[in-house]
């Protein structure tokens, strides 16, 4: 049984930083690309970024240069380091996994097989 368990998140002031973690079990971690998505209240799900199995990363335009994704294959963990947070970053954040052989743009949520439970990030102004 595959599980993605997220931790981190919470309330932070604008300009602050947070780090989210996502620990995977039940899969061969190195065979998967790990993505991060977010969904703000009343809005559609938005692509945040992805770490490929070779650790190449991609980012959505709204977070590029502020957010960093890293992964530790030995610990089956992917991280989302968020800096210079803005109120518009407030959302529920999800990690997701898809097989590395999937040929599709990183932002296509429907191509991800497994999802974390989501964690709330709230940025106050």
Image (cartoon, grey):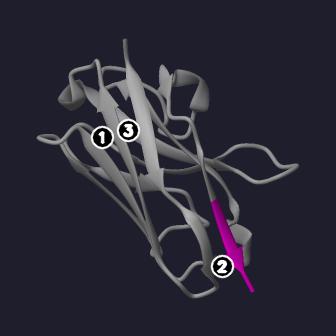
The residue that label 1 is drawn on is 52
Residue 124 part of the magenta segment: yes
- Comes first in the chain, label 3 or label 2: 3
Residue 98 part of the magenta segment: no
State the separation of the CA atoms marked 3 and 2.
24 Å
The residue that label 2 is drawn on is 86
Could you tell me which secondary element the residue under label 3 belongs to? strand
Q: Name the spot of residue 124 as percent of width and height, x first.
A: 72, 80
Q: Name the spot of residue 15 as percent of width and height, x first.
A: 57, 88
- Comes first in the chain, label 1 or label 3: 3
Q: Name the spot of residue 108 as percent of width and height, x first.
A: 57, 33
Query: Magenta part mainly helix, strand or loop?
Result: strand
The residue that label 3 is drawn on is 34
Alpha-carbon neighbours of circle 2 within 10 Å: few (<14), some, or many (≥20)? some
Q: Is residue 92 above or below residue 28?
A: below
Q: Quadrant of residue 125?
A: bottom right
* Label 2–label 1 contact, CB within 8 A: no
Q: Name the spot of residue 79 as percent of width and height, x first.
A: 35, 54
Alpha-carbon neighbours of circle 1 within 10 Å: few (<14), some, or many (≥20)? many
């Amino acid at each position: 049984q595959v599980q993605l368990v997220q931790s981190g998140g919470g309330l932070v002031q604008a300009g602050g930083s947070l780090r989210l973690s996502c620990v995977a079990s039940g899969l061969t971690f190195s065979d998967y690309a790990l993505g991060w998505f977010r969904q703000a209240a009343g809005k559609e799900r938005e692509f945040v970024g992805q770490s490929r199995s070779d650790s190449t990363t991609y980012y959505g335009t709204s977070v590029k240069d502020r957010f960093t994704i890293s992964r530790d294959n030995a610990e089956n963990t992917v991280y989302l380091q968020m800096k210079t947070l803005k109120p518009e970053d407030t959302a529920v954040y999800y990690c997701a996994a898809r097989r590395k052989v999937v040929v599709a743009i990183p932002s296509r949520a429907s191509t991800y097989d497994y999802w974390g439970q989501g964690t709330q990030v709230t940025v106050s102004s």
